[in-house]
Image (cartoon, coloured by chain):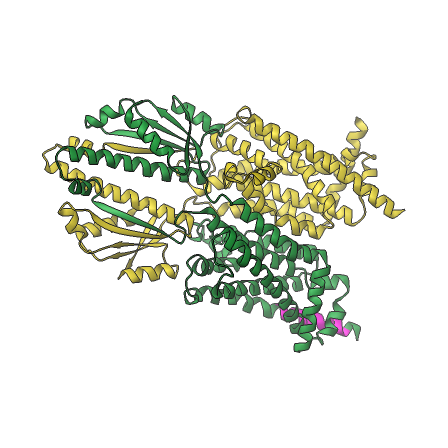
Chain colours: A green, B yellow
Amino acid sequence: MIRSVYNIMIREWKRILTLPQLYVVLLIVPPVICFLYGFIYEKEFARDLPVAVWDEARSPLSRQFTFMLEQTESIHITRQVHSAEEIRSLMEKGEIQAGVHFPRRMDEHIKSRTPVSITLYTNSASVVTGKLIYKDAARVLITAGSGVILQKLVKTGMPEGKAMALVQPVRLTSYFLYNAQYNYMKYLVPGLIAVGLQMIILMATVIVINEELRDGTMPELIRMANGAASNIMVGKGLAYLGASWLHYILATCIVYPFFAGGQIGGSFSLFILFNLLIIACISIGMTISIIVNDVMVACDIGVFYTSPAFVFSGFTFPRWGMPWYDQFYAWIMPFAPFVDGFFKVFFMELPLRYAHKEMAILLVYTVLTFPIGLFVLQRKVNKLMLKHA
Amino acid sequence: MLSTFRNIIRVFLREIRLVTKDHSLLLTLLIAPVLYAFFYGSIYKFKVEEKVLLAVADDDKSELSRTFVQELNKMQIASVVKAGSLQEAQELMYYGDCQGYLYIPYGLQQKVLSLQQGDIVLAVNAARFLPSSELAGALTTLALTVGGGVRLKYNQMQGLNTKMAMQETQPVNVDYRPVFNSRSSYGAFLLPGLLALILQQTLLIGLAESVALDKERRQVPGLVALAGGSYSATLWGKGLFYLLLYGCYTLFFMNVNYSILEIPFRGRVPDVSFIFFLFFLTLIPLGVWLGTIIPNQLMAAQLMVFSTYPVFLIAGYAWPFEALPVYMQWLSSLIPTTPFLKVYISIVQTGGTLADNSMSVIHLLLLCMLYALLALWGIRRLEKRQQSLSL
């Protein structure tokens, strides 16, 4: 049996290296997408986004606030405007992403106990830039506002420490763990590459058995397997698992360390989790390939099944924010539990024991699909053997 | 002119027959767009994430800390999970049972009452972008509100009446007005682009598969002959089917999906119709050209599926165009999605017009011409090669 499995694995590697539909997907696409994702987020942050200032105050304070806004990472003051309509119109044209309004007689009002409102407009049709600008602008304006209160209290003769306690009686210290700077590159690249790699394995394995049937090479394969479907599935599966290890090396030794700040070689926990994902994908892909005889239809099923994986996994938009039926659908794909575990072992660098639940769920996909594939393939093999007997 | 039109119709009718006989093309062109649109769209039905789980370890156990936690729990974004200790709160986050934790140390109320600064600590799992930033924002607002409340009380105790005390409490306020997406929701931002991307990718996959299928079956010379030997009649005859089909999908999406998913439409119908028309006119030759260079139908499907995420990411929609490296900006400028999304989002989301986006419209027109030339060249090259092989 071991010899038969080994021979089938070697035969599959020969197919991988000679058939364009396999070597393009397994050997050319991975480096292309890995480096593409890495280069997209090369700049890591969106910096110096164009922002307009509508300064009706024209005061030392408004100029100071404008200066403080300009010093932030995301904001770059590009022009002065004279109305809210102008801000809106420039946003429509895409010339600015936000606008800040300082009201008339701002300084006077502050001194005369009349509260003032500084208005921040962001083009939230683009959520990412809108939130980045809001985060920086709110920090500046809140700090500036606190500074005004502090100055007022100190002027009344209050000691600075006591005044500070009144400005901010409850001081909130926030820690942004595992991605302190909200670095887009660190966050998105590993996830995008992981989803790409599982898609690659699934798209390759959905055509591994039906293609043999279509091309008439199945009898040769059955002979090598001594008529055992398990030898075929294990032998072929090992070849694709081997290919996925090459992908793992590419991702964790080159792309993650250089583009996403990960450690070289990933970690043992990540390797285990990745293997469980790939084994699940191989089992699912092969089962589809065994059940669906038409290669093109199997490929389409693969496309339809695997392409929503990233969106449904909860990587960007959390699963608990989705309707129940979408949450249910997400569990049909092994990428969903993988993402939960991936956050723990890759981003949070936690020991594997924290991902036991996800690992168990990933195993379920293999346990459910492998026997179905094995049963159907054995029946097909038996039929073919009878036919050729 | 009339004969050219007849040739186009002939190729158009042949394309209908080809699509209806091929399972894969049927699935890609007739089922996938509608299914995907409802499927993907429904994810963002609620548009914003709510009730993000936050563990709270309250060592103070005072009236102030309890009020703070109660107020936090009332917020739309947060849902409090009680933890017995800081360590338990950390473990909850490690196991994925919450997205962060808040620690209220002993003595908070006592400090605040004696006019000293009290500290609370928030730790969020920033590996998860959206929930952590929302939680941190909400907590900051709450801490500021509590601070405002304390100052109000202090001012009242100083003898100021309620109105004056209020005025003294917060002399500078930030009035935040998110324009064109008032809740700054991820769903409202993503859905319009997502629907357009579904149209684009299914069209490109279907058309590239169709051309690759003709190529695989060595039917390109026959196809060109059916078009009266005209390469452009071949291109536009094949393309007419996709133009009409995707025109119908657009009409459907812009009415039914926009209405079901409650996506606001702020622009003018003629503007959005024109930009979609021009977009499809650019995608059709692009799809044909890709079909001529990909060896077969199977590989067309395999390769095109991997283009979806990269195309979306470099189009300047999810990530600002200006934040891409220069060479990526060049690559991005070569795909029709980039100028199209700029114009389409401006029209749909902000109420912009074609005139507001004239440079992007010209950009799309230029791409249309470029890909039309490439498609014609591709068809000609295939015809010559297959003719010479058959000789």
- Nearest the viewer among B314 and A261 is A261
Vertical side of A93 occupied by A38: above or below: below
Vertical side of A368 occupied by B353: above or below: above
Q: Residue at x 39, y 59 (%)?
A: B96
Tell me the quarter of the picture where residue B86 sits.
Answer: bottom left
Q: Give the main secondary structure of the magenta stretch.
A: helix
Vertical side of A213 occupied by A80: above or below: above
- Nearest the viewer among B166 and A326 is B166
How many marks overall? 0
The reply to whether residue B187 is in sight is: yes
Q: Is residue B339 left or right of residue A65?
A: right
Residue A380 magenta: yes
Q: Position of residue A300 (x, y in %)?
A: 64, 53
Quadrant of the rendering where the C terminus of chain A is positioned: bottom right
Tell me the quarter of the picture where residue B60 sits.
Answer: bottom left
- Nearest the viewer among B174 and A77 is A77
Q: Residue at x 14, y 45 (%)?
A: B115
Q: Residue at x 30, y 46 (%)?
A: B139
Q: Is residue B91 left or right of residue A45?
A: left
Q: Position of residue A139 (x, y in %)?
A: 32, 39
Quadrant of the rendering where the N terminus of chain A is positioned: bottom right
In the image, the segment drawn in magenta is: A373-386
Q: Is residue A38 left or right of residue B96?
A: right
Q: Position of residue B49 (x, y in %)?
A: 40, 47
The reply to whether residue B261 is in sight is: no
Q: Position of residue A10 (x, y in %)?
A: 69, 69
Residue furthest bottom in the image: A1
- Nearest the viewer among B272 and B143 is B143
Residue A36 magenta: no
